[in-house]
Every structure is written in structure tokens, then in C-alpha cells.
Image: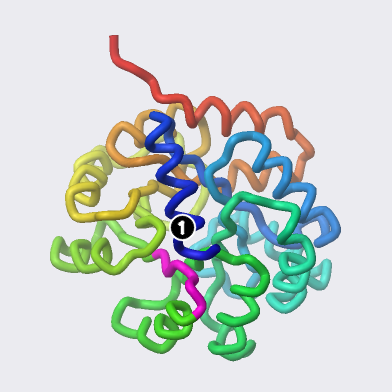
Amino acid sequence: MGKEKLKKALQEKIKSNQNIFAPYIMAGDGGLDILEERINFIQECGASAIELGIPFSDPVADGPTIQEAGIRALENGTTLTNVLEKLQSTKENRSIPIVIMTYLNPILVYGIEKFAKDAANAGVDGIIIPDLPMEEEHIISPSLSDYDIAFVRLAAMTSPKERLVELAKRSEGFLYAVAVNGTTGARTKHDTNVTSYLDDLKKYSDVPVLAGFGVSNTEQAHTLSKHCDGVIVGSKIVQLLHEGRLNEVHNLIEGSIIVEFSS
């Protein structure tokens, strides 16, 4: 479980010459009763891991689509507590790694040590905390380590080389390469310097590098994956699930993990 499960799942994709694809879904969007069903569906589509968002009232890294999903989830009464309870009660029915994406405040309210223990018992394999800077992460990293939960770090294009190197060195499971300067959400194109940024992160990192933010179609997934190990897709997946367009979710995941060869 934990770090080793996540590492193994991602390495299996790389060894099979496939791109890693990790969809983001919002816990409680549509109700917690369908969470297990959605996880199983995404698992069957061939995803490598799932980034599971915890709804929060002030999601500073999220664009409109995920913000709206968070509001729907909060209106459904979704909390960090009942998400972990749902994951714990259904953990025997899934094999795909679960990486929670949450802001720091819900963890502080929950209690850091209790959160790490309960998350591990619920089968959580990793965590992403977008509003926790590297200089402050010592408040939670020891507890995550004690319970074998991978602490995934985020890297930004605006960061200097020295910081990117340090983030890459610290990241566990994978390194989350933020591929835009801004919040989450679909983009028609990425900055021209994103490819060199990803190339550099690949040199610095001993764990897989996944590009996220602004990825919404297979063409973008293939373009970015040529410079890293795969992608994280959030807003597009959240939108398609909300609209019940499951076939398009399947096609996006399946089409993105296939490596395109140059002729």
C-alpha cells in the first residue's frame, strides 16, 4: 500500500511503453454514493491513478469548472471525514492508487496525525497540497512518512532552477508539473516554453513527471507526454462526468495512454 503501490502502478505503465494518465475527480460531485462506481469506471478505462479532490470553500488553485464541482459537492454535504470513511469502506473493491488533492486547512481542522492515520487506513496512497509551500511542509511531511503516504510536490514554471531541483528531489510518487501559469481549466494551447520546462524536470526528477493544468484532449496529452511521463486531466474529466458523457471519458483516457511514434 501507499508509496510502493503508487510507484509500482506508474512504473508498470512506463515499462509497458504507455503514457501515464491520472484523471482528477471531485469527491462528492453527484453524491458520495457514486464515488465507488466512478473510481471503478476510471480504473476500467486504464487510468494509472486517480487524483481525488476534496471540496473546499476557497480553492485557490482551481478554475471555474472544478470550483463549481466543489460547490456541488459541498452542497451534497461532502467533508474530508466522510470521504475518508467512504474510501475506507470500499478499499477492498479497488486496485487503482488514490492520491488525495486537498488544501491545508481541512487537514489542520481534522488534525494532522489523525488525518495521516485515517487516510492510510482508507487506502490513500498519496497526497497533493497545492497551498502548502516547501518551506512549511515540515508540519505534515513526518506524519505522512510515518503512515507511508506519498507526498507529491508541485512544480511551477515560474520557479527558479534551484527550487525546481529541490522539489524534484523531495517529491514522492510523482512530480506534478504545473503546465500553465494560472489556475486549473481547459486551454486551447500551452506556453511555448512548457516543453523545455518539462525536459528539465525529467532531468532533475527520479520519480515520474506528470504534466497537469490545462490538459483537455488527447492531442495535448500526447504533445506534453513526449517531454514527460504522462498527464493529469481535471476540468475536462469533471465536466464530462457531470454531464454523464462516460464514453468520452473512456476515449480520452484510452486515447491518451497510447504512445504515438514518429514516422
Residue 259 vertical placement versus 128 (above, below):
above
Give the secondary structure at mark 1: loop
> 10 Å neighbourhood of mark 1: few (<14), some, or many (≥20)?
some
**From the viewer's perspective, is 202 left or right of 239?**
left
Residue 168 coordinates in the image, percent (x, y): 26, 61
Residue 55 coordinates in the image, percent (x, y): 66, 68
Residue 131 vertical placement versus 41 (above, below):
below
Foreground of the two, 3 or 262: 3
> In the rendered image, which residue does mark 1 sit on?
183
Residue sitting at 62 percent across and 74 percent down? 119
Which segment is the magenta one?
147-152
Is residue 261 shown in magenta? no
In the displayed orientation, state which residue is furthest to the top. Answer: 263
Residue 110 coordinates in the image, percent (x, y): 64, 87
**From the viewer's perspective, is 200 left or right of 78?**
left
- Which of the 4 image quarters holds residue 158? bottom left
Is residue 148 shown in magenta? yes
**From the viewer's perspective, is 164 left or right of 36?**
left
Residue sitting at 67 percent across and 70 percent down? 122
Query: Looking at numbered disc 1 in the image, what kind of residue is underneath it?
Result: Thr
Quadrant containing the N terminus in the rendered view: bottom right
Residue sitting at 31 percent across and 32 percent down? 226
